[in-house]
Image (tube, rainbow, N blue to C red):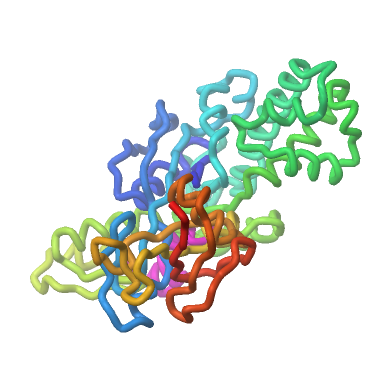
Amino acid sequence: MKMGIVGLPNKGKSTLFNALTSAEAKTANYPFTTITPNQGIAFASSPCPHVRLHTACNPNNSKCENGRRKIPINVIDVAGLVEGAHEGKGMGNQFLADVAPADCLVLVADASGGTDDEGNPCTPGTHDVVRDVELTLQEIDFWLAQVLQRNAQKAKGKTFEEFAALLSGLRVTLEQLKHAYAKTELVEARFAQHSQEEYVQLAEEVRRQSKPLVIAANKADSPHAKENVEKLKQAFPEFTVIPTAADAELSLKKAQQKRWVHYEGNRFEAVEKNLDARIVEALEHIRNVLETWGGTGVQELANHCTFSLLQQIVTYPVEDDAHYSNHFGKVLPDAVLLPKGSTALQLAERIHTDLAKGFLHAVDAETKMRIGKETPLHDGQIVKIVSAH
């Protein structure tokens, strides 16, 4: 899965990207800091089964910290959009196209109200944060409408299914396209004959279906944040709004690396007692942010995208169901994300095609109950695949 971070210039996208991935993407207080998209790895967090099993785990494709399994997910940070980007303004369509492979979107708004439409600094609290979302959605939808229209013309005289196949690069499925047509009440058979307004209407629904979205109300440590978070919630009830303080998250991670603090979950404790007064003051400010919002919101974003927007579950394939291990004796080595409702056969397909071809049945490693190939798996389940291969 891939999260795409989008928004207007200088709203804190690259800082959020760094906070999510612990990367070092360039950040600065001016527009278009990101010229080429930054790509990295963030981690969704889920309870690790080793805790309930009262054993130790040996993670292979993920990591385990304080009883939480951290499963890697891909993140892309796209350059800031400006009004008219779909017409080539600002950094233009090339960066809108970077959004295409994303499975979900994190739309970053500046909760401080301190940057204008073009990303230039202004007096905090004077910019309407609602415009951050409106203009970003407008540009994405206008760009998507152009893509739909262009591919519809390519598929003119062909079937609706062939039209849908041309949208695979956008991660749009036939089912999603059909649902969009049903919602808009447009006629599938006329896919190459819509007006521009109808393509925009269709694009809005295709975006909802194929790229579910969460709003990150960034710079939540601002005195104007509470008011602006409420504005966003009222203006966009269809989206979840998560207050985020990416700067605070980055500062805490750096402080932990220097062994100044111990940072876990939504709390931190000072370890170094002889810190400079300015550092102590900065840490106290961050502590107030955590108390106000219950955290920096950064991990909450990764989890919301993974488990709420994309409806993923975490499964743990093993070869030895008695010891919950692989053939090397490693306990709970792999954590595999699958869409909710996935079956044991689909888990086998994810692991290896040969395993799926020879699939006989699966076993719940904890209950020892047999699992048929059509039985949906549940979150946190430890599964042994029994195969003829």
Residue 322 % position (x, y): 35, 76
Question: Measuring 49% from the left and 35% from the top, which residue is drawn there?
Answer: 9
Residue 106 % position (x, y): 53, 48
Range of magenta residues: 286-304
Q: Viewer-proximal residue, 108 or 368?
A: 368
Instruction: Answer above or below: position of 293 versus 71.
Output: below
Instruction: Answer above or below: position of 275 versus 134.
Output: below
Question: Measuring 28% from the left and 79% from the top, which residue is drawn there?
Answer: 55
Residue 115 % position (x, y): 49, 42
Instruction: Answer above or below: position of 85 versus 310.
Output: above
Residue 380 % position (x, y): 47, 70
Q: Is residue 280 visible?
A: yes
- Left or right for 221, reference 256: right
- Left or right for 176, reference 293: right
- Left or right for 292, reference 311: left
Taking the magenta stretch, the answer to whether it contains residue 142 is no
